[in-house]
Amino acid sequence: MALCWKFRKEKEIWKIVNSTQDHLAPDYFSGNLRTISFFSYRTLKKATRDFDKKNQLGGGGFGPVYKGTLDDGRTIAVKQLLVGKSQQGENEFLAEVRMLTSIQHKNLVRLVGCCSEGAQRLLVYEYMTNGCLSSIISGKNMTFLDWKTRFQIIIGIARGLQYLHEDSNLRIVHRDIKASNILLDDKFQPKISDFGLAKFFPEDQAYLSTRFAGTLGYCAPEYALRGELSEKADIYSFGVLVLEIISCRKNTDLSLPLEMQYLPEYVSSYLHLFLIPFNGDIDVYHIFFGLNTFKRLTFMWSCNLGSII
Ligand SMILES: Nc1ncnc2c1ncn2[C@@H]1O[C@H](COP(=O)(O)OP(=O)(O)O)[C@@H](O)[C@H]1O
Ligand SMILES: [Mg+2]
């Protein structure tokens, strides 16, 4: 009798679950982790109007990203991973998603759900209203960032990185810190995106070559030349990013005069002028900015711009 009741109950639960297009994923998302939504492919297809090109926000090394709207009105960003069936099984994918959902910080883009159906592997993120930093830096988006906002963005990215490197339960090296991976919410708070995505791809894949080498202009020399990967690679990229934010220009701009084309090179030729008044004393910088986070910035400057500090 009890068994019969249990059977009916389970059947009813599954009926309810299956009758909704998206539902909370079963056991693999339980425990002390935040539960995430498990979307059906049909739901995401509908939300993005059949992955309409007009809804495409961009297409990086991991696959295209589409803007979408769910039936409940929530706006989302859907990343369609370029992972073939053979690359990763459903359980492995779900295990990785489960791991990523345990990583939460106000300066990391929130993963709201995923879809794994047949060969399809999709990740669903909260939509960031102010898009990515690269469109502001490259001038595509005419938004002007005042100094306070720029500072807020720099500090936010540093905090997100510190969390990934030191404070999260997993130690994650992002490997692809760049302006297009910094998204801005409605208050221009920065959020790092694409963290942990390398986990979905084996490192020896050919199409990962851009990923493995990072992105031109942001890649730390020891990583590009010798493949040495550590948190320092992210700090180097962060340094390039800080220069881009301060100067509001791309790290490489071939339309400029030769000596100005590569931002880190250009800045390093002027850096000695900047350091003279402070007599090379980094404590002055700490007081000046009044934030411990600036230690990171000075480290980054030293990584990027030679042996001046
Ligand atoms: N959650 C999101 N909210 C808003 N826009 C996003 C979101 N995720 C990605 N994008 C946009 O899609 C673009 C492409 O993203 P991505 O596939 O990560 O490629 P890449 O980082 O190499 O440009 C980003 O530059 C950004 O403009
Ligand atoms: Mg990205």
Image (cartoon, helix red, strand yellow):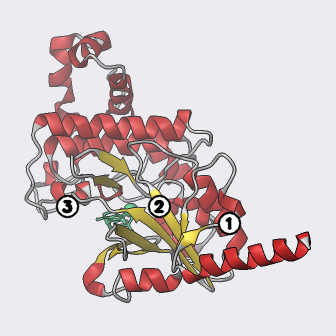
CB at mark 3 closer than 8 A to ligand 1? yes
The kind of secondary structure element at disc 3 is helix
Disc 2 crowd, CA 10 A, few/some/many (<14, 14-19, 20+):
many
Judging depth in this view, the residue of 13 and 255 nearest the camera is: 13
Mark 3 and mark 1: Cα distance apart in space:
39 Å
Precedes in sequence: disc 3 or disc 1: 1
Where, quadrant-wise, is the C terminus in this rendering? top left
Can residue 64 be spotted in the picture? yes
Quadrant, the N terminus: bottom right
- Is residue 35 rendered to the left or right of residue 247? right
Locate residue 166, reporting x and y percent. Answer: 55, 33
Residue 174 rendering spot, x and y as whole percentages? 49, 50
- Mark drawn on residue 26: 1
The foreground one among 157 and 10 is: 10
- Identify which residue is drawn at 47% across, 58% down: 111
Q: Earlier in the sequence, mark 3 or mark 2?
A: 2
Query: Which amino acid is tagged 2?
Result: Val
Q: Secondary structure under badge 1?
A: loop
Above or below: residue 69 compared with residue 132: below
Mark 2 lies on residue = 112
